[in-house]
Amino acid sequence: DATANDIPNDPFDVKGYPTIYFRSASGKIVSYEGDRTKEDIIDFIEKNRDKAGDATTEEEEKKDEL
């Protein structure tokens, strides 16, 4: 919680509270701009999460090396 903790060099550029960011397992960060309902937040997560079988950034970098 940025209101209770000093976070130097804030990478998220929070301008107001509550501000919601989602970070996928591959490291992609997406800002949530939708309604604050359970259904909308779950839908946002489902759309932005890494799906099984998706290549991660690390896997893509290894392919580029080949």
Image (cartoon, grey):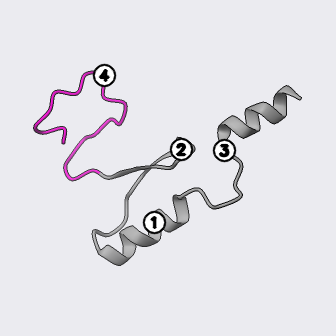
Q: Where is residue 37 drawn, in percent x and y?
A: 29, 74
The label shown at residue 28 is 2
Q: Where is residue 9 drawn, in percent x and y?
A: 31, 22
Query: Magenta region, mostly helix, strand or loop?
Result: loop
Residue placed under numbered mark 3 in the picture: 56
Q: Which residues are magenta?
A: 1-19
Q: Earlier in the sequence, mark 3 or mark 2?
A: 2
**What is the distance, in whole Å, between disc 1 and disc 3 at their CAs?**
19 Å
Q: Where is residue 4 drawn, in percent x and y?
A: 10, 37
Residue 47 in the image: above or below residue 57: below
Of labels 1 and 3, the one closer to you: 3
Asked whether, in this view, residue 58 is left or right of residue 49, the answer is right
Residue 46 in the image: above or below residue 18: below
Please state, as top left, top right, bottom left or bottom right, where the C terminus lies in the image: top right
Residue placed under numbered mark 1 in the picture: 44
Residue placed under numbered mark 4 in the picture: 9
